[in-house]
Image (spheres, rainbow, N blue to C red):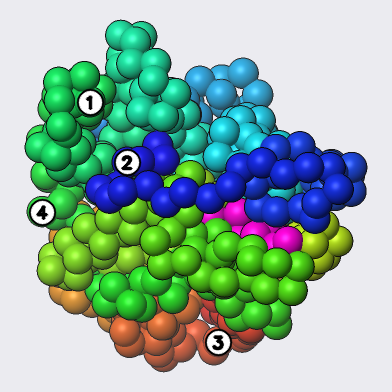
Amino acid sequence: MDDIEPGQPNTQPDTQTDTQPDTQTDRDARPEIVVLAVVALAIGLFTRFVTRSSLWLDEALSVNIAQLPLGDMTEALKHDGHPPLYYAILHGWMNIFGSGDVAVRGLSGLFGIATLPLVWILGRRKGGTVLAWVAVAVVAVSPFAVRYSNETRMYSLVILLVVIGWLLLDDIVDRKKPTMGRFIGLGFVGAALLYTHYWSIWLLGAVGITSLWRIWRAPDRPSRRPWIGIAIAAGVAGVAFLPWLPTMLYQSANTGTPWAKASRPTSALSLVLADNGGGTYGEQTLVAAMFAMAMVLGLLGVAIDRRTTALDLRTRPPLRGAAWIAGLTFAIGCVVSFVTSSAFASRYSAVIFPFLALLAAAGCICFHARWVRFGVVAVFCSFLAVGAFWNVIWQRTELKVIADAVAASSQVGDIVVFCPDQLGPAGSRVMPSGLTLVSYPTYDDGKFVDWVDYAQRNAASDPDAFAARLLAEAGSTRSIYLVWNDSYKTFEGKCGGLVAALAAARPPEQLIGDDGERYFEHAALTRFAAPA
């Protein structure tokens, strides 16, 4: 995919003698680079399968949907807002390995591990074994890749599918192997991406737009033929998606992203860089800046001599296509999201993460001197590893702590209320048995969140009426435990109103404080004991 973006290729020397200093065009990796990559791989393997946190909202909701019979999954996803492929795969996985935290996260870890050897192949094609090993090291310890390799969501699968599709494109365009099998494979991967995450639409759109451009600009029929095949493959992927299109349109019209406001494209870019830097630990901003600088150097950096690396605005040909597709995909997605007032989450950038990671890896090795290059790679990967380990110790949800507090003081039959309902999927998963679970405002068991007309339903809800129903069900013998957070979008003041309504009937006792400094998903626990 070197020449996937319009323009004339840049030319740089690709040979050197054994006595010359290293350059970014080395084809053979030095031993120290291989050793560093092996260490990074060991860290990556560990961090992809180990985490101290229990499942948070999105993970628990994924498990609850995937546990449904396959025939019921489409209806459930209509109320959730995602395509079905990951959930179907997770359904089969849980039938074999169970639904424990380690088991359900293991599927994403498997996808993450499967991606690494393919990244090595891509790196070797674009810059020899030097780039191959450095790319593997970067992806192995990338906080972004690590997080979504140990989270029960579809983003690790998205990354794997994008890398497979990139290899197929590279075979067709750069390695001049436009075989029917590769075009069929490309169409299959494109369809799989569409059925995994909707931001894949913008990736396939970027590939389709580029294909049409190259068809139009091709000087002759042989040059045009592979791009015609790529355009057809993208079209076939779109046709394969048509059976799901009515469900997607229903989701788009009725679910949306009520949990956050729309982001400007510049804000979205900041979120992507921050997520590639890791989580909310102290070095996140520094690592994000390092990642951004590495990507710029990967695209533009050229070693002039032992002391000088310059920026060539013509870009480096082997990675020009990667930058073009990543940039175009991101631009289309951000503009559409902003125009349609849809929120952006940095995890959506999984569709372009492989391009960004390879650019960053290339930026680390665009230096002339061998040991300078090694030092840059070592420092960069060390900072990335900090973010990777942060994901291991980071507590994604406070609900396990809350569940332990409930277990210590509750009796069989007591009522646990989740306000808002977004606390229900993770909370219901860890609560002790024998309790009645309900969520605000729907009064269901809290295992699912119905995103259809979400904001309107929440705005119309009545905390006083909900409290009256709770108190009537609790009677004089059952305590009420309220798990609540009043800061969720579309719930402003509702959970606080529920607290006030219950407190008017029973004295409140706060058992756990809302610890937003430590937990991503956080809440308070207030007990309204049964009358003595």
* 450 within the magenta span: no
Q: Amino acid at mark 4?
A: Ala
Is 203 positioned to the left or the right of 130 in the image? left
| Structural crowding at the residue carrying mark 2, measured as other residues with C-alpha within 10 Å and reported as few (<14), some (14–19) or many (≥20) | many
Q: Which residue is mark 1?
A: 223
Which comes sooner in the sequence, label 2 or label 3? 2
Pointer 3 residue: 508
Q: Is residue 442 something that shows in the picture?
A: no
Q: Which residue is mark 4?
A: 253
**In the rendering, at what x and y percent does residue 5 appear?**
30, 47
Q: Amino acid at mark 2?
A: Ile
Q: Nearer the viewer, mark 4 or mark 3?
A: 4
Point out the tag, 1 or 3, that comes first from the N-terminus.
Answer: 1
Q: Earlier in the sequence, mark 4 or mark 3?
A: 4
| Identity of the residue drawn at 39% across and 86% down | 496
Query: In which quadrant is the C terminus drawn?
Result: bottom right
Q: Quadrant of residue 229?
A: top left
Q: CA distance from mark 4 to mark 3?
A: 41 Å
- How far apart in space, not on screen, are marks 2 and 4 (Cα)? 35 Å
Q: Position of residue 506 (x, y in %)?
A: 50, 85
Q: From the viewer's perspective, is the residue at label 1 or at label 3 nearer? A: 1
Task: Pick whichever of labels 1 and 2 is earlier in the sequence.
Answer: 2
Task: Find the distance from the CA under tag 1 to the CA under tag 2.
Answer: 12 Å
Q: Position of residue 72 (x, y in %)?
A: 29, 27
Q: Amino acid at mark 3?
A: Pro
Q: Is residue 512 left or right of residue 276?
A: right
Position of residue 417 measured from the top left corner of the image (x, y, whole percent): 46, 66
CA gap, disc 2 and disc 3: 64 Å
- Residue 464 in sight: yes
Say which element carries label 4: helix
Determine the secondary structure under disc 2.
Answer: loop
